[in-house]
Amino acid sequence: LQKAIQMDSTLHDRFAEVLCLQENVPEALNQLEKAFNNGYRDLFWLKITPELQILRYDTRFRDLMDEFFK
């Protein structure tokens, strides 16, 4: 994963999915925050992606969603 990030650092949303599958929620949230800061705004995808389901009840995830999707 680190090698992929070095190759293309714009795919933070995809990296977050992989990290969720590895149950690394804190790092997945960091990657999502980077994606949002880079302009990622696909709210529909965030809600339907099964890999991100682990985040749906996390307060930091909800705070990020509130911050970027007001």
Image: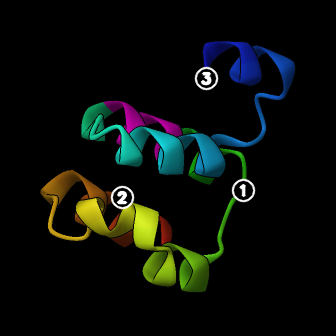
- Indicate yes or no whether the magenta region holds residue 31: yes
Q: Main secondary structure of the magenta part?
A: helix
Camera-side residue of 31 and 17: 17
Instruction: Residue under label 2, please give it.
Output: 64
Picture quadrant of residue 30: top left
- The disc, 2 or 3, on the residue closer to the chain's N-terminal end is 3
Instruction: Residue under label 3, please give it.
Output: 1
**Residue at the location (27% across, 41% down)?**
23
Q: Is residue 13 above or below residue 50?
A: above
- The disc, 3 or 1, on the residue closer to the chain's N-terminal end is 3
Residue 24, x across and y down, in percent: 29, 34
Callout 2 secondary element: helix
**Residue at the location (27% across, 60% down)?**
55
Q: Which residues are magenta?
A: 27-33
Query: What amino acid type should be assigned to the residue bearing mark 1?
Result: Gly
Residue 21, x across and y down, in percent: 39, 47
Tag on residue 27?
A: none
